[in-house]
Amino acid sequence: MASPLPGTISILNQCVNMTVTGSTSEEMRPESVILHPLGTAAAPEPDLLCIFGTGDLGRSLGLRLLQSGYRVVYGSRRPHSCGPLPQGAQVMSHAAAAHSASLIFICVHREHYDFLEKMTHHLQGKVLVDLSNNLKKGIYPEANATYLQRLVPGAAVVKGLNTLSAWALQNGLLAGKQVYLCGDSAEAKQAVAVMATKLGLTVLDRGSLSAARELEDFPLRLFPEWRLPLSVAVGLTAFFFFYLLLRDVIYAYVEQDKDISYRIMVSLGNKVFPIVSLIMLSLCYLPGVIAAVLQLYRGTKYKRFPDWLDRWMVCRKQMGLLALGFAFLHAIYTFIIPIRYAVRHKLISRVVDEMKNNKTTPFYFDDTEAWGTDSFYLLGILGLLLYVLLGLTSLPSVGGSLSWREFSFIQSKLGHLTLFICTSHGYIYGWNKFLSPSTYKWYTPPGYMLCLIVPSVVLVLKLLLLLPCVDRTLTRIRQGWERSQPSEETGEVKATNL
Amino acid sequence: MASPLPGTISILNQCVNMTVTGSTSEEMRPESVILHPLGTAAAPEPDLLCIFGTGDLGRSLGLRLLQSGYRVVYGSRRPHSCGPLPQGAQVMSHAAAAHSASLIFICVHREHYDFLEKMTHHLQGKVLVDLSNNLKKGIYPEANATYLQRLVPGAAVVKGLNTLSAWALQNGLLAGKQVYLCGDSAEAKQAVAVMATKLGLTVLDRGSLSAARELEDFPLRLFPEWRLPLSVAVGLTAFFFFYLLLRDVIYAYVEQDKDISYRIMVSLGNKVFPIVSLIMLSLCYLPGVIAAVLQLYRGTKYKRFPDWLDRWMVCRKQMGLLALGFAFLHAIYTFIIPIRYAVRHKLISRVVDEMKNNKTTPFYFDDTEAWGTDSFYLLGILGLLLYVLLGLTSLPSVGGSLSWREFSFIQSKLGHLTLFICTSHGYIYGWNKFLSPSTYKWYTPPGYMLCLIVPSVVLVLKLLLLLPCVDRTLTRIRQGWERSQPSEETGEVKATNL
Amino acid sequence: MASPLPGTISILNQCVNMTVTGSTSEEMRPESVILHPLGTAAAPEPDLLCIFGTGDLGRSLGLRLLQSGYRVVYGSRRPHSCGPLPQGAQVMSHAAAAHSASLIFICVHREHYDFLEKMTHHLQGKVLVDLSNNLKKGIYPEANATYLQRLVPGAAVVKGLNTLSAWALQNGLLAGKQVYLCGDSAEAKQAVAVMATKLGLTVLDRGSLSAARELEDFPLRLFPEWRLPLSVAVGLTAFFFFYLLLRDVIYAYVEQDKDISYRIMVSLGNKVFPIVSLIMLSLCYLPGVIAAVLQLYRGTKYKRFPDWLDRWMVCRKQMGLLALGFAFLHAIYTFIIPIRYAVRHKLISRVVDEMKNNKTTPFYFDDTEAWGTDSFYLLGILGLLLYVLLGLTSLPSVGGSLSWREFSFIQSKLGHLTLFICTSHGYIYGWNKFLSPSTYKWYTPPGYMLCLIVPSVVLVLKLLLLLPCVDRTLTRIRQGWERSQPSEETGEVKATNL
């Protein structure tokens, strides 16, 4: 690395002190393990950082760096006319700016990297951070960072921070965000990691520069954590749509010669949506129950869950939000029932029929029916209210204002209550139809019966887990207790876990 | 306190400077009052912090400390195999780690504290921060921190930060959070307070270590600020439910011998919910009006409000959100009215009756009725819209993006407008029934009359406060003016208040 | 500026070092341009800051400063009894506090500034930051800051930070917030700017102290970014309300002698709201389309858009949220249709009429009608769902958790899909009425036809922009390509833009 300018030495003192201390303590205690050498003497930990490019990203990054206590110098081909820059930053020619700092952010489109080739001697030994992204995957044969390294072989190129947007930088939305780094020089990566940590970011090292392509594809990903839940939702919706199409519309057409295909638009949807919603909600809580059973069976919490369970647990929130979406659709479909043409037609026809047949007591008021349907609606409304509550606490700003215990109370206790209420809503829907043979058209069970299976299983398992004896064992396991007498080694793992 | 390792002395320079300055200025100016001695020479203000325990909490805390500019060393029994730790942290044996720092975070379950007893000589003079929590209240005879202090009498135990979750630490959600500290050593507490402040936390000192039990119970509390509003809501709901049950269902059974008990499920709810919602909303705005009247009466804003008023004002937001929840239920109950069995039955019966009686002009269109009911619905819908708007601005992220004046405009002006519209909605509901004697079954007024009392009082009082002469006086009082000529003493209080 | 007290010199070392470096590097590189001199030797960059006033704002500001690493001293007339102050702060008499720091925040109401006049000699050469606001515009002949400067002519008054509320300061909601400064001394402003930047704020210099009045009016503004969208919404609502009043109610009264004025309350609203909602939604996406056409026409993205387009694009989010509000009203108006008196009356009348006329096949079931109305409802419901999704991602905390690509996917792709679905909803509404002459009462087209014009234009233009050849050119332009061969100068602008 090039030595910094004479003027900047004094302000590096603090860092140097830290460095010296770090290595001293390392020498003194042979049992210590340095995970990541906290900067050796040669490592670049600059106080003054350089940014090439005065576009949106460059400006926002500079602002953020200034706010984190760094000094910033911009490199520009036209230092005298490059628009408004953050207060406190300097702007120079590219060459001068490169000289003044050992870490340079390249906030320039890949298409314009060629100017860097002409100034390789200025960039000798510098750390170049490539933040660029492409608009599409695979439009260039090599990753931007690899291309940059090829243009400036004397510099240490680090790919990273490219998942940050100018908007997030400007609005200070960095706290807790994870960023990825890769590069061939461990020292260069370390310097960038220290800088990123000071910005409030969490850094993940992804290895050598050959991972650059992967990192450049990250910002192009669309909702990766929604992929699995969305597939499940689409699959369930498609299955139940065709299943009910067969049982309702095609059955009526074949067996009764009635064309009720108009029902496809709304009636069928209002059967499919609550089914999918309930199944998705139960799929939210199934992995938690499976995990508890697994921990009970293994008698320890220190064994990793199988991969499929891990992946499932990670997307529970998305599952739940999709379930809420389907419940929302179900609610609105229900609200518009009475204004539908077919429903009003049926109502009027019925009155006219009753009158024509001239019955004396045409309208016996069925008290059981009144109680049943009203209970059905009541449970549905309560379920929706709880659903919305769960959704609200999933909002980052609301969830963030809850304590851990409050959050887990809402998501676990209230979540299982929601599942229980919505499942009851389903049971009441089919209350007196379960045993009637006419329900089983073409020997198939109706959709609502199928959709009650998974929620019922989850609720029964959860109930078993809540039995005092089981609950006590599970609590002890989660506090670190193990059934088999742990060896000294595993005892240590327990001791460090809070 | 034990002196830090030789290697760490240099990096403490800045702090020492600060310390010296602090005490110098104190000596120089006898009129100055030091609220909290900003660190005496012996106070531990370490740059290098030690964490015992590499579990979730330990890892997240370490990450946060690194992001705030501290160096972190982990103490572990198995330093070579303790899983992924934050980038930049070191890991050592417990003893070595304890030696290197003067402040040690204990991120270990209480069940495993015993290993600390064996290394008391390493912990001599150190500050131990006990972050542990228990799963339930009162499962141990003494607080975790008291137990720790008993195990390691030579260290200064500080209980605190235990309300922080690993999740909040990891996601950088600390800004503005309040944490509590307690401990017997003022210096140790001061050191922890300085560290916590640097993490962006607001620290509240709760006294000696005997308060540890109380602090350990904090994370086990569930929605403490919701307790009062929830009690009020449950109380009101229960009262009005039984009141209306008596007036509607039991009255019909006793006097008219009709069993309309099926109405309990939905009809009764749709009467109780809007009543409770309106009363809760008016209870949101009543304390503000009372406070204004009190300030006018006292002629100053510098007297504290009585405790009950303070407690009431603190939970206005929760009151309002519960009112919104009840309004939401009322809306959905209303939407499903036409699909209820009883309603459809009544509609059909009515048609059939009309036909049977063979009236010539069976359906006179009552224009007043049409205007009245439509106005009733219009006001209800507008009220719901405003309710939702108020709820949205209660979301932390939305409220945080508003200026103070915008927030107060929404919550005060729009809030009172919502109350006015919802109250009108209630008045129109009973418009021509107020004077009819049949309304007063068993000499009791109907529910909607009872629920209009509090909102009407609030609105009338608010209207009086908006009279120019009253408003002017109130504004002057809130700017610091006092009716009785203030003495020199109170004048000072005014001068410092913005 | 007055030199700081002896005791504070040592802690200024770091800043002085920085300063020296800054000026050195400036001298060495003649091509460098210093945008804002990063502190000259005389500039006050105090580590110890003074706050006059111990009210809410003073306390919150002090807390925030302490959390950002500053030392804080309060000036109070009664240092021994001024209530709870943030942990770590000192409190002294005004004079002593003023002596100890070179930067003093005045957190006192303007009404009490007179005490500052008596201590002008203590304030000689200090930087005074005036944070005060007034309750109304224009109640004083001169700005608070101008008045302060007149009282203490020897100090450098800087007006600024007055848009921060005590609440935002306390809750750490400062990240990315923009604050304004003005003042006659560039050095004083610079010192305040550096401090504000360290608090995480973005500083905008508004010039000399004569801008103070403008800055003091900022906190009194109410939703400035909502002004234009609200005007558009009110204008559209008023226009369509009177247009439909004429076509529906007055037409019926004049031509058919029927009084259907009761429809004004709900029916008319349920026609106006969806119309305004759809137009507002299309006005969200129109400026984006215009901008793309403009860029294609100009062949470059480096020319500024006309002012009206800029202003329009800035308030697209607010336009969309208002459109969502109107869509929400439309949905609720639709849900309550069946419980309206007029609707139920019509239904019953129709049955009775049918019976009286004694038709044999009174109720032919129109399959096309069933399909048509159900599709209409389906599109409406899907549109509402997407609308709500768009609204949810507009929440600061949700939008902040999305990557740039995800956000733009939702707001652009899903937004245009929403527009398409809602426009189809409108087309189906009028499907068989477009060619019927009875539709054109008094030769005016119905409202839904008018409201389909703008959305249709936007959708057609967007479709044209999505044609592969057009899209490719636009993408290249947005990556920095220009149609006319760029000169060396413009090439530079391109190179720095990311």
Image: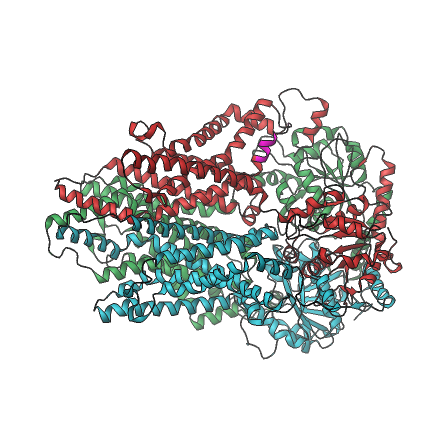
Chain colours: A green, B cyan, C red
Up the image or down, A63 lies above or below B20; here it is above
- Residue found farthest to the bottom: B141
Quadrant in the picture for residue C87: bottom right
Which stretch appears magenta? C301-311
From the image, which quarter does the N terminus of chain A lie in? top right
Q: Nearer the viewer, residue A29 or C126?
A: C126
Give the position of the C terminus of chain A as an image quadrant: bottom right
The answer to whether residue C186 is magenta is: no
Q: Position of residue B480 (x, y in %)?
A: 67, 61
Instruction: Please say if C359 is above or below B294.
Output: above
Residue ranking furthest to the front: B469
Position of residue C386 measured from the top left corner of the image (x, y, whole percent): 44, 42
* Residue A465 pos. (x, y %): 43, 67
- Comparing A142 with B250, the one in front is B250
| For residue C362, side relative to residue B277 (left or right) | left
Q: Position of residue C389 (x, y in %)?
A: 47, 45
Residue B223 horizontal side relative to residue C336, left or right: right
